[in-house]
Image: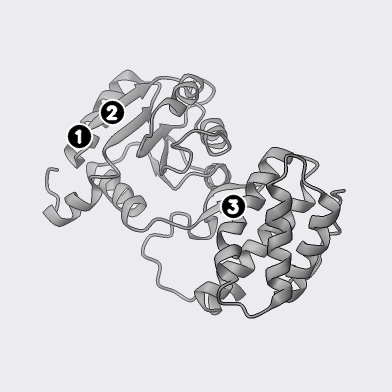
């Protein structure tokens, strides 16, 4: 906890309780471990390649993951995508990706893999501290979809950005924006059901965590009935997509979401 504000250090304790470090270079791994301990890390597990780390990760609830991208031995993109789509208890834990070179293409790949933050090697203890504080104190909303699983990409590495928000959803009240986004993801997951049934079903279930509580504040019987229909079907071993489809289209119409792509699920 060297050089840290005591109050901030206390807030970071939960994030630094059990750290997973994936780094191919043993010397760099030792340096990173020392930095993490200076921040207050209690326990650190180190693996040199992403496949072994991905194999071992489900066994423990890691509270922070630092993964180096040094393909092919240590592929942070493959690791992050694999973990986010797994059943590991740490699948939602914050991930900081580090790489020796950052191009715009790689930056987009890191973001789309589901990472929370990135750093370019070499970096300072202060750089690492800033990233850990950001994932701990300014965690972004979780997105569970088919094409993407991870923290909201719209705020990726945005730091303390205080400029104008240009998306339409940013100008709505938070609860309305959350419900609209949930319906959009629900609709997209249904449309991609045939391509990845397991992830599509998990993504649809995740949106109900927003839509079911919304039934308490949205005074629409059709909205309630549609949510109930979807929930009932997803609880079945083999959900009836023909019953889910009209319910989703009804929710989309209620939220005034355009049908840009016709559904292919059946």
In this view, the mark in front (3 or 2) = 3
Q: Earlier in the sequence, mark 1 or mark 3?
A: 1
| Colour setup of the view | one colour
Residue beneath disc 1: 37
Looking at the figure, which quarter contains the N terminus? Answer: top left
Q: Is residue 50 visible?
A: yes
Q: Position of residue 62 (x, y in %)?
A: 37, 34
Cα gap from disc 2 to disc 1, whole angstroms: 9 Å
Estimate how packed mark 2 is, as few (under 14), some (14 to 19) or many (20 or more) residues with alpha carbons within 10 Å: some
Residue 100 or residue 212, whichever sits in front: 212
Q: Is residue 145 left or right of residue 121?
A: right
Identify the residue shown where x is 63% and y is 69%: 180
Q: Position of residue 52 (x, y in %)?
A: 47, 19
In this view, the mark in front (1 or 3) = 3
Q: Is residue 165 visible?
A: no
Residue beneath disc 3: 206
Q: Position of residue 16 (x, y in %)?
A: 27, 40
Identify the residue shown where x is 45% and y is 57%: 140
**In the structure shown, which secondary structural element does the residue marked by tag 1 occupy?**
helix
Circles 1, 3 touching at the beta carbon (< 8 Å)? no
Residue 44 is labelled as: 2
Identify the residue shown where x is 62% and y is 65%: 181
């Amino acid at each position: 906890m060297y050089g840290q504000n005591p109050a901030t250090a206390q807030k970071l304790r939960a994030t630094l309780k059990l750290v997973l470090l994936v780094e191919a270079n043993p010397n760099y791994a030792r340096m990173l471990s020392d930095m993490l301990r200076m921040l207050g890390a209690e326990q650190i597990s180190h693996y040199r390649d992403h496949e072994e780390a991905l194999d071992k990760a489900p066994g423990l609830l890691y509270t922070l993951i630092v993964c180096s991208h040094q393909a092919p031995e240590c592929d942070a993109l493959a690791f992050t995508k694999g973990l986010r789509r797994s059943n590991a208890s740490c699948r939602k834990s914050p991930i900081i990706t580090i790489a020796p070179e950052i191009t715009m293409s790689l930056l987009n790949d890191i973001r789309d893999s589901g990472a929370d933050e990135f750093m370019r090697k070499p970096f300072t203890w202060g750089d690492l501290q800033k990233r850990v504080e950001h994932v701990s104190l300014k965690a972004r909303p979780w997105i569970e979809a088919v094409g993407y699983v991870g923290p909201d990409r719209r705020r990726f590495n945005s730091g303390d950005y205080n400029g104008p928000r240009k998306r339409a959803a940013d100008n709505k009240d938070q609860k309305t924006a959350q419900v609209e986004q949930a319906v959009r993801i629900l609709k997209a997951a249904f449309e991609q059901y045939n391509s990845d049934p397991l992830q599509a079903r998990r993504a649809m279930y995740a949106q109900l965590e927003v839509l079911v509580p919304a039934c308490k504040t949205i005074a629409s019987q059709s909205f309630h009935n549609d949510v109930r229909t979807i929930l009932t079907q997803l609880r079945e071993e083999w959900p009836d997509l023909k019953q889910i489809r009209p319910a989703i289209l009804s929710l989309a119409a209620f939220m005034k979401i355009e049908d840009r792509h016709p559904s292919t699920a059946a």
